[in-house]
Image (tube, rainbow, N blue to C red):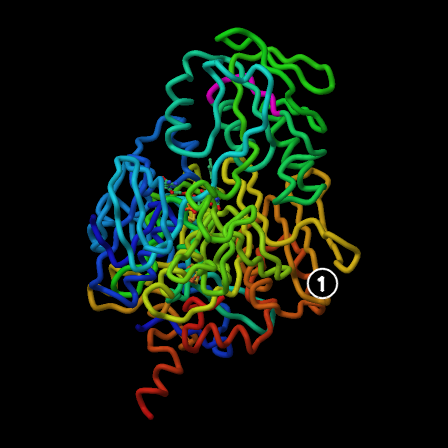
Amino acid sequence: MKKVIIIEDYCIACYNCEVACVATHSRSQDPVKSYKREGLRGKTNAVVEVESPLAFSSMCRHCKHPWCMDACISGAIQRLDNGIVYLDEERCVGCWGCVVGCPYGAAHPNLAGKDKHAFKCDLCIKRLDAGLNPACVEACPNNALLYDETIEEREEVHK
Amino acid sequence: MSKSEYVIVGSNVAAVGAIDGIRKHDKKSSILTISFESLGSYSKAMLAEYIEGANAQWLEFRGKDYFKKMGVDCLFGRKVTGLDSDKSILTTDNGEEISYKKLLLGVGGVPFKPVIKGAEGKELVFTFTDLLDAEKIREALPRFNSAVVIGAGFTGTEIAYTLNKLNKKVTVVELGDRVLVKALDPRSSEIAQSLMHGEGIEFYLNDTVEEISGNKEITGVSLKSGKVIPCQAVITAIGVIPNGELIKNTPVKFDRGLDVDDYMCTNVPNVYGAGDVVKALDITDGLKRSLPLWPLAFQQGLVAGKNMAGGRYPYAGGLPINSLKFLKVPILSAGITTPPDASYEVIYVSDPKGTFYRSLVLKEGRLKGFVTIGEIDGAGVLTGLIRNKIDISGIKTKLLNKKKVGLMQMPREWRNRIFTRRDETDYHD
Ligand SMILES: Cc1cc2nc3c(=O)[nH]c(=O)nc-3n(C[C@H](O)[C@H](O)[C@H](O)COP(=O)(O)OP(=O)(O)OC[C@H]3O[C@@H](n4cnc5c(N)ncnc54)[C@H](O)[C@@H]3O)c2cc1C
Ligand code: SF4
Ligand code: SF4
C-alpha cells in the first residue's frame, strides 16, 4: 500500500504540513478559521520535530500490525480493508492505550480539548477517495513528504 | 455431537485475537466460540463506563456483527464444564458434546477472593471483573451511599474512582504499602494516590478488611489495625488469577496459570492458551508470569490463532503497558517501573507542583520501563525503545525532557527505516 514517505534531509521546518493537516480535518477547511475559531491548534496528525539543522515531520505509519489497535479497549481503532489504520474519535473513550502502545508516538492524546479522545493520521482518507494526495504531502514545498510505496516495495517492483 | 475444526472457549479479547489469527491463514474451516456470558465479546476495560450508565452494546469493541463477518459460530450463555483432551471433546452445562481438532482456552481469569468474616449472606458485597458484576453494582447504586473497596490495584482504584464520581463516599483498603504497585514506582504511586485523595477518596494502606459487620445489610467493616469504617457496600477488587477450573483433572499443565510454549501451545498438542489464563513471557526480563492485560491477551490470541491454523509464529513475549485511564492527570507506564535489584539504574524528573513526573528504568544502557505523568504525548516512543532494546545511554537525559518525546532522539538509521522502508511491524514481537 502507498503511505507517506518521510525524507528527513529535505525538511525545511516550514510547518506547512501541520497547517494543512489541521485545516483538512476541520469543519471550515480553512487554515486561519480552524486555528482561531475551531480551536484546533495542536490537533495535527503530522508533527514537525526540529533540532536544528535536522527537522522532519512524522505521522502514523499505518502498520500492518498496528500496536495502537492491540491496545484499543473500545474498538475505536480498526485496520480498514485498504490498509488504513483508522481511529474513530466518536468511539474513543480516551484510555490512552494507543498513546502508550504506538512505538512511533503517532497516536496523540487530546488533552487540551473538552473531549477526551485520541487522534491520529487517517491518511486523508476522504482526499484519497477524491483522487487527491494526503494534505501534508500536497503542502510540502520541498518533497520531504511523498505519497508512495515504501522504498523497499518500489525497489522490488523495479527488480 | 457437534463438531468444529477450531473451538475457542471464551469469546473475549483473546478469542478475538485468535479468530483474527486463524482467519489470516484459514478462511474456510469452521470456528466455534463459546462463552457463558450472554454478550459475546465486550470490553472489560470499559465496565466502569457501563456502571456510569453506558449501554452494554457500547462495550462490544468489534461491533455486533464481528463473529458473523468472520464466519464464526457462537454459543453464548453456555458454560463448558468438561474437557477430555484425549478424545478432543468438550461438554457443556446442558450435557452437549462438542468435538474439536484444535482448541483454544481463552477463559480469562477469576477474581481473587480473600476469605472475610461476615461476607456471606450480605447483599451488597461485590467483585468487579465481568459484566454480570458490573450489572449488579449498577443495579445496586441507589441502595448505597458509601463503599469500601478492597485492593488498590487497577480494578480497585478504577471502581473506587467511578463510585466516587457517582457521589458515593469511598474508602480503599490496601494490604501493601502503596497504591498501584504493579504499574508504578513509589514516587508515582504517591502522586496517583494524592490525585485520587484530592477527589475525595480515602486510603488505608498496610491494612486489610477482617470482618464485614451487619446482618443482610452491611453496617461497616473492621480492619486488621482495629479501625472500623462504616459503609453500606463492599467491593473486592484484588485482581484476577488465571482460571484453571476447566483443566482440573486433565493432563493440561497448569501451575498458577496455563503453561504454554513459544507457540502458545500447552503440553497437550492441539490445545492452545491465550490471555489472562496463561503465564506469558514478559520481554522485559524474560520470565513467565500472569500478565492480565488487554493488549497482551489480544496479541497472544493472534499468535495462538496463527499457529492453530498451521503457521509457525513464535510469541516473542509481551510488554506490560498501563494507562490510568480514569484520572484527570494522565499517567502512563510500561515494563519494569520498580527495579527488583541493584543492577538497574533509575533516573527521574519531577516538578514540584506534581503535574509532571517521569522516571526511566534502565539496565545495561537499555530501557526496561518508564512512568510518565502529565506529559504523555509520544510516550509510545519509549515503549518502542523497550521493545527494540535500543541502547539509550547517550540520550537518556533528553528523554526526561518535559517536551513531547519524539523520534528525533532515535538513532538516525532506525528512524529512517521507519520513515522510508518496508513495514516491519507484522507480528513478530
Ligand atoms: C474492570 C476491569 C478493567 C480493566 N481495564 C483494563 C485496562 O484499562 N487495560 C488493560 O490492558 N486491561 C484491563 N483489564 C484487563 C483486561 O480486560 C483483560 O486482560 C482481558 O479482558 C483478558 O481477556 P481474555 O480474553 O483473556 O479473558 P476475559 O476477558 O476474562 O474473557 C474470558 C472469556 O471466557 C469465558 N469463559 C470462561 N470460562 C468459561 C467456561 N467454562 N465456559 C464458557 N466460557 C467461559 C468468559 O465468558 C469470557 O468470554 C481490565 C479488567 C477489568 C476486569
Ligand atoms: S498509530 Fe502507531 S502503531 Fe498505530 S498504525 Fe500508526 S504508527 Fe502504527
Ligand atoms: S485512547 Fe481511544 S483510540 Fe486510543 S486506545 Fe483508548 S479508546 Fe482506543
Answer with left or right where residue A122 lies relative to residue B200: left
Residue depicted at 69% across the width and 56% down the height:
B361
Residue depicted at 34% across the width and 87% down the height:
A156
Q: Tell me: is circle 1 under 8 Å from ligand 1.
A: no
Question: Could you classify mark 1 by the number of other residues whose Cα lies within 10 Å: few (under 14), some (14-19), or many (20 or more)?
Answer: some
Identify the residue under disc 1.
B363
Decide which of B215, A158 is in the foreground and name it: B215
Which of the 4 image quarters holds residue B313?
bottom left
Q: Chain of mark 1?
A: B
Image position, residue A126 (x, y; %): 24, 59
Residue depicted at 41% across the width and 69% down the height:
B426
SS label for mark 1? strand
Which of the 4 image quarters holds residue B60?
top left
Q: Which residues are magenta?
A: B166-172
Image position, residue B401 (x, y; %): 66, 56
Decide which of B14, B398 is in the foreground and name it: B14
Image position, residue B99 (x, y; %): 27, 52
- Looking at the rendered structure, the kind of residue marked 1 is Lys
